[in-house]
Image: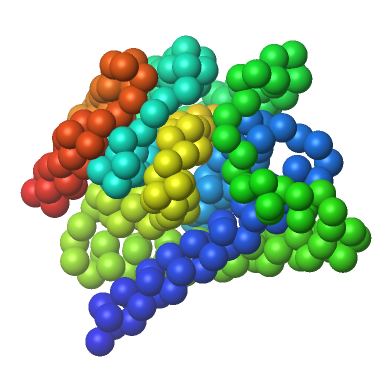
Amino acid sequence: MELWANIGWVVLGLVLLYYGAEWLVKGSSEIAIKFGISPLVVGLTVVAFGTSAPELLVCLQANFQDKGDLAIGNVVGSNICNIAMVLGASAIIFPLVIHQQIIKREMVILSVVSLVFVGMIYDNVLSQFEGALLFLGVIAYVIFSVIQARRDPEIEIDDTLNPEEVEAVLAGGNKRLLINMGLILLGILLLFVGSDRLVAGAEAIANSLGVPEAIIALTLIAFGTSLPELATGVMASWKKQGDIVVGNAVGSCIFNLMAVAGLTSALKPVATTQLNWIDLAVMLGTAGVGWAMMSTNRKISRVEGVIMLAAYLGYCYYLSKR
C-alpha cells in the first residue's frame, strides 16, 4: 500500500509539473510578445527556460535535501531525453526540417557546454564556483541571443504562437497582462509543489525497491521533467513547425546545463556518487549524433527518429539492468 501511495505522489508531482510549466510558458511567452521580444528569443530563451523550470525546481529541492545524485541525474537524464526521445518521437510524427542557425550556433553551444559540464563533474562534485561560471554563461547566452536577433531579424524562426494569437496578445489590454502575470505565479507555485512531491515519492520508491537514486533520476524523474518539452514537440510537429521542436529541445538542454545545474550548484555544491561515465558519454553521444543527423540535408527523417527513440529505450533498458 505504501508503494502505491508513493507512486501516487510521483504521478501527482508530474501532473503539477506539467501544468505549472504549461502556464509559466504561456504567461511568459505572451508577456514577451506584448513587449516586443522577437519570436526567436521567445522560443530559445523564454519557452526553453519555462520548459526547463521543472528540472530547476526538482534539482534545487533534491540538492537542499542532500540528494546530489537525484539533482545531477535529472540534468543528465533530461538532456538525453530531450534529444533522443523528444526529437525522435517528434520526427516520427513528421520529419523535422532544421533551421541553419540551430545547426551552426545552438548545437555548437550545446556541444561545448556539455563538454565543459563533463569536465567540471569529473571529480563527482560541482562546486559553487563552477556553478557560478555556468550560470553566468547562460546570462551571456540570453544577452547574445537578444542582440543577435535584433541585428539580424531574418534568422527568426516560426512564431511560438499563431498569427491570430499574436494579434490577440498585442491587442490585449491590462486585463490580459494581469492574467498572464497570474499564470506565471500560479505556474511557479505548481512547479514548487510538484517538484517536492516528485522528489519525495521517487526517493521513497527507490528506497523501497532498492534502486539507486541516480537510476530513478535518469529515468523516471528525467522523463517526468521532460514532459513539457515532449508535449511542445508533439504539438509543434503536428503543425509541421520543426524549428519550434528543435529550438525548444536544444534550448532546454542548454538551460539544463547552465541555468539548472549552474544555479543549483552555485547555491550549494552538488556531490554525486552513483552517476558513472557511461551516463555522461550517452549524454555527449546523443548531442553529437543529433547534431550529425540535423546536418544531413538539414532535417531529421522518420527513420532517424525511430533510431533515436530506439536508442533511448535501449539506454533505459540498460539502466534497468545496472
Quadrant housing residue 144 = top right
- 175 lies left or right of 200: right
Residue at the (58%, 62%) spot, across then down: 20
Residue at the (66%, 31%) spot, across then down: 41
Q: Which one is in front, 285 or 135? A: 285
Q: Can residue 63 be seen in this snapshot?
A: no
Q: Which one is in front, 69 or 80? A: 80
Q: Is residue 260 above or below residue 231?
A: above
Residue farthest to the left, as pictured: 321
Q: Is residue 75 above or below residue 126?
A: below
Residue at the (72%, 48%) spot, across then down: 166
* Residue 154 place in picture, x, y as percent: 65, 18
Q: Quadrant of the N terminus?
A: bottom left
Q: Is residue 3 above or below residue 234?
A: below
* Residue 184 place in picture, x, y as percent: 71, 58
* Residue 25 place in picture, x, y as percent: 62, 52
Q: Quadrant of the C terminus?
A: top left
* Residue 162 place in picture, x, y as percent: 62, 48
